[in-house]
Amino acid sequence: MAGEPQDGCLFCKVVAGRIPATIVRETETTVAFRDINPQAPTHVLVIPKAHYENAAALAVGAPEVVADVLRETQAVAESEKLDSYRTVFNTGAGAGQTVFHVHAHVLGGRGLQWPPG
Ligand code: 5GP
Ligand code: ZN
């Protein structure tokens, strides 16, 4: 069912505490943890605890949690003391999505080029 934990989903395992993660913030509906392969001095992933494949599916299935995730990206930026940061949702393998449990990348702590590669 939509939003239920999925067997084999890496980020559902993070939510369940079944694999280690460096958690920086947690709310009733979200978890924020450091990316294992950081692309910037700050690289934190913000995920909903509920399993949805991507941002669009989350917006359809649990729209209130989209706001929770975005609020948490700002909270992470504040706790990491970032003046500027980038929030990225990769959607689909062709755009670089490798984990199909929606996550916002929060990147900062260095200059970020635009447009990205
Ligand atoms: P995507 O490519 O799907 O947008 O992002 C997935 C992110 O998850 C990547 O930046 C990758 O480094 C990160 N990642 C993959 N496996 C793990 C893990 O086991 N722990 C953590 N903390 N991050 C992971
Ligand atoms: Zn999941």
Image (spheres, rainbow, N blue to C red):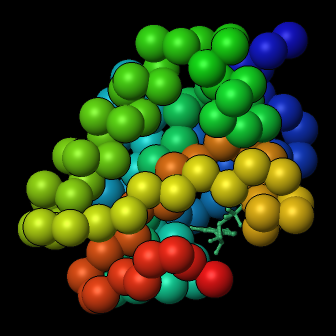
Query: Can residue 51 be seen in the rendering of this structure?
Result: no
Identify which residue is drawn at 77% across, 67% down. Answer: 96
User: Total label count?
Assistant: 0
Q: Nearer the viewer, residue 111 or 107?
A: 111
For image coordinates 63% across by 83% down, the residue present is 117
Tell me the quarter of the image containing the N terminus.
top right
> On the rendered structure, is 52 left or right of 20?
right
- Across and down, in percent, residue 71 comes to 29, 34
Q: Position of residue 5 (x, y in %)?
A: 76, 28
Quarter holding ligand 1: bottom right
Q: Position of residue 112 (x, y in %)?
A: 37, 82
**Location of residue 108 (image quadrant):** bottom left
Above or below, 20 against 10 in this view is: below
Say which of 3 and 67 sits in front: 67
- Outermost residue toward the front in this view: 115
Question: Residue 12 sits in which quadrant?
Answer: top right
Q: Is residue 5 left or right of residue 32?
A: right
The residue lying at 38 percent from left, 64 percent from top is 86
Q: Is residue 35 left or right of residue 53?
A: left
What is the x, y in percent for residue 23?
A: 39, 57
Q: Is residue 15 visible?
A: yes
**In the figure, is residue 2 to the left or right of 109?**
right
At a point 37% along the width and 36% down the height, the residue shown is: 70
